[in-house]
Image (cartoon, rainbow, N blue to C red):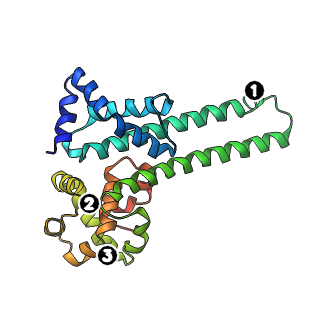
Amino acid sequence: MQHIEEEAMQAAQDKHTHELFIEKNRSFILRCASKHTKKYITDSDDEWSVAMIAFSEAIKAYDVGKGAFLSFADLVISRRLRDYFRSEMRFSDEISINPSMFDGQNDDETEDIAMRKAVLEQTTCAEDYTMQYEIEAIGALLGEYGFSFGELTSCSPKASKTKKSCADAVNHLLQTPLLFSEMHRSKVLPIKALSLGSGVVLKILERHRKYIIATAEILHGDFPHLAEYLSFIKNGNE
């Protein structure tokens, strides 16, 4: 176990150590907040408070099965900032909608249609915003493995048989916590052990390494929107 992971687990057991650990990682929290908001954040911003609370939450929820602590904390911060922005967007939507929509007193059919269209667009925008944050978060995580989210297009399996093999490999990773944890810690796909455990030949694992890593991380992590595109993995079918 790495030193930072040991510190995180100790911080979860003692309030004073918990506070010291947060202060020690103050710069990391600010960097995460700035990265996920795409603007410079200081400790006077609301986003700082959200990120700090998220970091504290990550300390309490962390265990070694979740991989590297800082990567886990970064995901929790991303999720909490995303929730914060979504709540801000909902509040903005609420105060911009004409109250007559809720009391049945709107006699202007044209205005009603326009408002309903606006609400639909706002909802779609919120969903796109959430997807954007998931893509940014998984992109940052995949960067630690040495490749980008955009590279998945060129390395994704095309043939049905190959997709089935990759699904088998991913499922074996997800069902073998120690193997997944080792991959997440070392940022290297354990190809030989994975081939032995899943029965997938080395050649496929090597050729589709990036796809398997990304898919396993998405399904293991907090990426509900991206995971919807990978539902076939659970049973190994298209």
N-terminal-most mark, 3 or 2: 3
* Secondary structure beneath label 3: helix
Q: Residues within 10 Å of mark 2 (few under 14, many from 20)?
A: many
Say which mark, if any, is on residue 171: 2
* Residue bearing the label numbered 3: 162
* Secondary structure beneath label 1: helix
Give residue 129's position: percent from left, percent from top. 55, 48
Using the image as rendered, state which of residue 47 and residue 192 is in the foreground. Answer: 47
Q: Residue 229's image quarter?
A: bottom left
* 198 left or right, relative to 130: left
The residue drawn where x is 39% and y is 39% is 77
* 89 left or right, relative to 211: right
Give residue 66's position: percent from left, percent from top. 25, 45
Say which mark, if any, is on residue 103: 1
Give residue 78's position: percent from left, percent from top. 42, 42
Q: Please, is residue 23 above or below residue 83 in the view?
A: above
* Secondary structure beneath label 2: helix
Q: Are marks 3 and 2 in contact (CB under 8 Å)?
A: no
Q: Are marks 1 and 3 in contact (CB under 8 Å)?
A: no
* 63 left or right, relative to 213: left
